[in-house]
Amino acid sequence: MGEPAYPPGFPHFKYVNPGAPKGGQLRLAEDGTFDSFNFVVPRGTPATGLNLIYDTLMASSYDEVATEYGLIAEGVSHPADFSSVTYRLRADARWHDGKPISPEDVVFSFEALTKNNPNQRFYYSHVVKAEKTGERDVTFTFDQAGNRELPQIVGQLTILPKHWWTGTDANGKPRDIAQGTLEVPLGSGAYRIKSFIAGRSITYERVKDYWAKDLNVNVGKDNFDEMRYEYFRDDTVMLEAFKADQYDFRVESSAKNWATAYDFPARTDGRVILEMFENRASGVMQAFIPNLRRDKFKDPRVRRALNYALDFEGMNHTLFFGQYKRTNSFFSGTELASSGLPQGRELEILNTLKDKVPPQVFTTAYTNPESGSEEARRANLREAARLFKEAGYEIKNRKLVNAKGEPFTIEFLLSSPAMERVAVFYRPALERLGIEVSIRMVDTSQYINRVRSRDYDMIVSGWGQSLSPGNEQREYWGSEAADREGSRNLAGIKDPAVDALIEKVIYASDRADLVAATHALDRVLLWNEYVIPAWGLNYTRTARWDRFAHPAQLPTYSYAFPDIWWFDPAKASKAGGGAAK
């Protein structure tokens, strides 16, 4: 929607340093483990950073809401009704083995991804086929017209080398893209895999003769000679490893750690820098997510009662050092968040679904219960008890039971010690209501598998939202995604009104229409009480050893680390140790 900010033939993005020096090593850390270099299939755990070795048809701009420019593709065209899109590939686009990237590679990639990955199949479900339509042209045909986002999201497709995946390995065994593998794959991107220790570490090296290194979308990017990911099984050990200078940069998700864990000599003397970057690019709904596939969570009064039991203000004071604000939108912190009462175009949209959405949508601005005093906490628990009673529950022998006498139980499935502290704080209020609460801590692999197979009562997770929502909303809230293993519809939402509003978002005619449709979707999701909203901070907290530099003016919608940062030898020599090379 709208016009690109950069003209044809622009030399580079304005937010990069075109003269950024190349060199140095960046050391990063990851939680858990990995057992595959094949991200196509949704089994096993792919290594972090695989995106570094592959190119896509288009590349995103960090200072525009939703604009992309040619990478593998040098041109794109589509009919006025958006019923198809044709991409023309650059003649000099190459794989690391020197072979050209071809239309056959693009078709192979689309078919492999949609055949073997249910999420990709769903995301591109309206793409009927991809076919070679010229020497360097690939056309994607859609099963519908009017979806303005489809031509663009096809450009986000990761392109894989057909000749490599359909060839044989060093032992003469045919490769199978439907299986996990630790054979180092062929790529086309700015980096290649240099070395790895399965499950423990992986190092990528910059490709010196990368075919697209001088392309305008890449100027000033990909500046590190090496990028290394070290894996840790424990968050506490990972933090201590950072303080011991075993890696260079971390995003701190724990308010407690941010407030208390960085008082150590390297921080005091300035060798470690703590910096917060404002998040202008996305809205996040983090929440306690009940599994609506289980009968006990199907009644919205039950879910609202669980919200009343959550003492956020007490939690914020006790656990979070007052750093957070309660989330009151699925598009929190952006212009897409609903507020007040619906008006104008949003009201028009909602009126078409008046008999299918909660009546409060039209009469009351959504708010979460507040618990700033002991009196408020008691009142909230009384209201929670009333809602449970209204939903058919009663207290027997100090247990909350339904009409069949079955106790109401909740198991929190968690993999993070930080979230365990949160669940422990939440538990007493739930137990006062007669709910049996258990907290189940599992390792990352088991957590991923249980979430994929929907084997949970309640998890703490969330959804990140771009400033240009579209087809991914079906994946988050759509009925078709609810029962698909591995989808992002974690709650299991199946609601015709939500489905209809998702379509309004996807088929919005312009920006104003998109904003109105998103407000309507947000409001209906909130008033259905599908989740118990948690909290957020509209900043990313980061800690880094002072070995790196970045352009004076970072882009509007990202701090773009490590994409446009570079290794600074002078700083590194002062910081000492670590990756000072």
Image: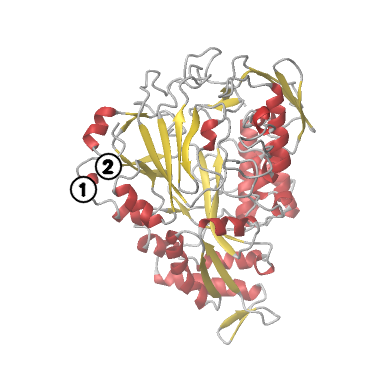
In whole angstroms, how far apart are the C-alphas of marks 1 and 2?
Answer: 9 Å
Res 339 label: none
Q: As drawn, which residue projects farthest toward the front?
A: 171
In the rendered structure, which amino acid carries the disc numbered 2? Val
Colouring style? secondary structure
Residue 41, percent from left and from top: 65, 44
The numbered mark, 1 or 2, whose residue comes first in the sequence reads 1
Residue 558, percent from left and from top: 45, 34
Q: As drawn, which residue projects farthest toward the top?
A: 9
Q: Picture quarter containing residue 154?
A: top right
User: Which residue is located at x 52 percent, y 18 percent?
Assistant: 6
Q: Picture quarter containing residue 135?
A: top right
Say what secondary structure mark 2 lies in.
Answer: strand
User: Which residue is located at x 66 percent, y 46 percent?
Assistant: 475
Q: How many marks?
A: 2
Residue identified by numbered label 1: 265
Residue identified by numbered label 2: 272
User: Which residue is located at x 21 percent, y 46 percent?
Assistant: 268
Say what secondary structure mark 1 lies in.
Answer: helix
Report the side of 227 relative to 328 (left or right): left
Residue 459, percent from left and from top: 55, 60
> Between 480 and 133, which is closer to the camera in this rendering?
133
The N terminus, quarter of image = top right
